[in-house]
Image: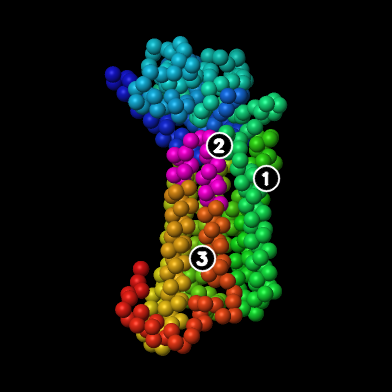
Amino acid sequence: MATATAARVLLLLLAVAGALLRPAAAEIKQESFKDDSRASILFEKFGFSRRGFVSIAITGAKTSSKLAKADPEQFGFFLLSDEALFEAIYEQPPPTDLNPNPDPNPGCVLSSPYVKPLFSFADLDGNGNYHKTFPVTHPDEYSLFFANCAPETAVTMEVRTDMYNTNLDGSKDYLSVGQAPVPAIYAFFTVCYLVFLGVWLYVTLYRNRLSAHRIHHLMSGLLAARMLYCISAAEDQHYIRIAGTPHGWDVMFYLFQLVKGVILFAVIALIGTGWSFLKPFLQDKEKKVLMVVIPLQVAANIASAVVGETGPFLQGWVTWNQIFLFVDVACCCAVLFPVVWSMRSLRESSKTDGKAARTLAKLTLFRQFYVVVIGYLYFTRIIVYALKTITNYKYRWVSVAAEEVATVAFYLFMFYMFRPAERNQYFALDEDEEEAAELALREEEFEL
């Protein structure tokens, strides 16, 4: 009973490691390990069809132990499916197709009836090399693990992994089943942002050119950066799908991810301060916010690149995930301060400037902007992550589509509300509204 409980605990730990890995393209990965003593190493998580394959090549594998010489059967690779994991947790009978001849020794995860063992070090040749392709005929989402069940033993090896599905014509598809529509989704939104940018440039450079401010031109740069990000993401996923490698598009992807992230948070912060369209300068505390937000965005994108381009087999990979999460949350919090300060400043000025209608309009505008920014950040950070986690592996593209739809909706709101106009409805009001606005400001506490 104790052994069964320990086995279930180990499988749960492996499940947590798998949950941290966002299912994505199974690029061809090649990694070296030197004196690595971890009990388990997660390589990839991939959604297979009925024509899936896992190819693993090992060179120069050897072990070094502080104790007696380890049994090579205690080292090996295995697949763990989500379906088998749930059965293990709820103690249901294991599926016979995963492991028809389980080892009665429960001391190693490789002997668990809930995993699909691929091979052990006992199958290596005299030089520590091995190369074989394994079919996956039961469609599901699988995590590829390496297990080291020998205590006080380190492993040195070079590993190359290929995980893919095959099409009816025999060609390889390196995208997980649920990621297949992603290149088309990014291509569609590239066109959307191209049209959006064209309309915005017409408004700012021609139709309302005299009313356009510097913030509006920075917003043009945001649209251009977002469009280039979608182009690079579409190309990155396309080349991974057909070749298993991004052909350099990953560099462009991370570059424009950084650029659009920095500009987005800068635009939100600057709009929150009212820079250029309400006042021509920034206060010292507002400058400090930008000095904090921009470096944090750079750090968050560096962490994102490390997480995306390596994998969970990297020692410290979980730490990089935590850094990315912490820094991103810090940016989301910091960027809201200028909006709050502007609302408080307008509230205080309404008592002395005699322009109640204008002040009420500005407060309404900033309050709406504050609520929408919080909603957007919450949706893209919490809801989208939940969609990635809880949706069936066949529909993981839904989270990508949801994030892009939410981003377009947020941009449409922000660009419309702060568009250049000679008589913006929020800043050019009739004198008849003054008395009603004064009454509203007295009666309603316009606080957060």
Q: Nearer the viewer, residue 68 or 143?
A: 143
- Helix or strand or loop: what does disc 1 sit on? helix
Residue to which mark 1 is pinned: 235
Q: Residue at x 67, y 58 (%)?
A: 194
Image height of 49 relative to 436, above or below: above
Residue to which mark 3 is pinned: 268
Residue farthest left in this picture: 1
Residue to which mark 2 is pinned: 178
Q: Residue at x 51, y 28 (%)?
A: 140
> Which amino acid does the dot numbered 1 rest on?
Glu
Which of the two discs, 3 and 2, labels the residue nearer the N terminus?
A: 2
Q: Main secondary structure of the magenta part?
A: helix
Disc 2 crowd rating (10 Å Cα; few below 14, some 14-19, many 20+) is many
Image height of 339 relative to 142, above or below: below
Which of the two discs, 1 and 3, labels the residue nearer the N terminus?
A: 1
- Helix or strand or loop: what does disc 2 sit on? helix
Q: Is residue 394 magenta?
A: yes
Q: Position of residue 410 (x, y in %)?
A: 52, 60
Look at the image and give the residue range highlighted in magenta.
385-404
Disc 1 crowd rating (10 Å Cα; few below 14, some 14-19, many 20+) is many
Can residue 160 be seen in this snapshot? Answer: no
